[in-house]
Image: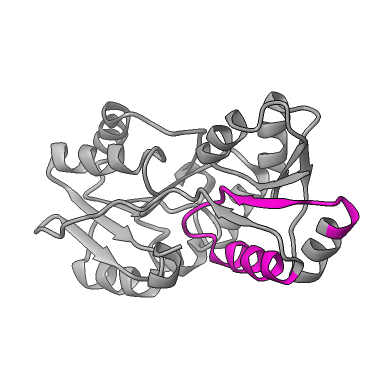
Amino acid sequence: MILVLGGTSATHKAVEGLRGKDFIITLATDYGEREFRLRYPDNVMKIRFSEETMENFIRNRHVAEIIDTTHPHAAEITATAKTVADRCAIPYTSLVRKTEEIEETDLVHVFSGYEEAAGFLREADFRRILFTTGSNNIHLFKEFAHIGWVRILPYEKSIEKCVQSGFERSRIIAMQGPFTTEFNAALCRELGAGCVVSKNSGEGSGFKEKLNACLMLKIHFVVINPPEEEADR
């Protein structure tokens, strides 16, 4: 059996090459499980791995290879998979999307972490900000909840995290992407956003379309890169 650590568009590309083979796609969230089960009803399981549970899973299910198609910022699961694959003496293959090479300009600002990006937003004093970084770290931007909107996946737990971080429900946009440049631009116009905040999520994630929308509107784009050890994986 092949273990596919899933959750992104890269997962679908990996599965295309596994036709006729025994594989299982694991997802860490209820939302991910539901979405992928619609397409692969017999090959999906929700599980949040630790090193111990992954090692037991591999041994009990006779996994012969791990294929990593997780998010570029999902460093913990990638580190776990590499460690366990080495311990179990099975191949580890990374198909994680490569992050985009971004050149900083007067409107494009690149940071290596959330705290650094928050510091920039604090000093810049924007009046309206659109956050598209997901919900896991949205609490780090809670001080901007009164001037910000957050666009997240339509997942109950994601919405709750935003509410707990101080965002009114009227400022939460729960939609499934990726989105076109034109859609992003229209949303920014509607909100009057002067800045969009995004993770560098790599090719095919909708990241480039957000960047292009900001360039089109001549508004600021704040990029959060994964740490170097993640970007190199």
Mark count: 0
Question: In front: 41, or 212?
Answer: 41
Q: Position of residue 180 (x, y in %)?
A: 33, 29
* Horizontal side, residue 26 vs residue 102: left or right: right
The percent position of residue 70, horizontal first and vertical second, equals 56, 51
Left/right of residue 124 with respect to residue 200 in the rendered view: left
**Residue depicted at 28% across the width and 71% down the height:** 122
Q: Residue at x 77, y 34 (%)?
A: 43
Q: Which residues are magenta?
A: 59-87
> Toward which corner of the image does residue 145 lie, by quadrant?
bottom left
Relative horizontal placement of residue 225, taking residue 31 as reference (left or right): left
Q: Is residue 75 magenta?
A: yes
Q: Nearer the viewer, residue 112 or 76?
A: 76
Q: Quadrant of residue 40?
A: top right
On the image, the x and y values in percent for residue 184 come to 31, 34
- Quarter of the N terminus within the rendering: top right
Q: Position of residue 157 (x, y in %)?
A: 66, 50
Decide if residue 191 is in sight here: no
- Residue 140 horizontal side relative to residue 51, left or right: left
In the image, is residue 193 part of the stretch drawn in magenta? no
How is the model colour-coded?
one colour
| Identity of the residue furthest to the right in this view | 60
Residue placed farthest to the left in the image? 106
Which residue appears at 25% of the width and 33% of the height? 185
From this viewpoint, is residue 192 visible? yes
Relative vertical location of residue 171 with respect to residue 80 in this rendering, above or below: above
40 or 180: which is nearer to us?
40
Up the image or down, 62 lies above or below 20; here it is: below
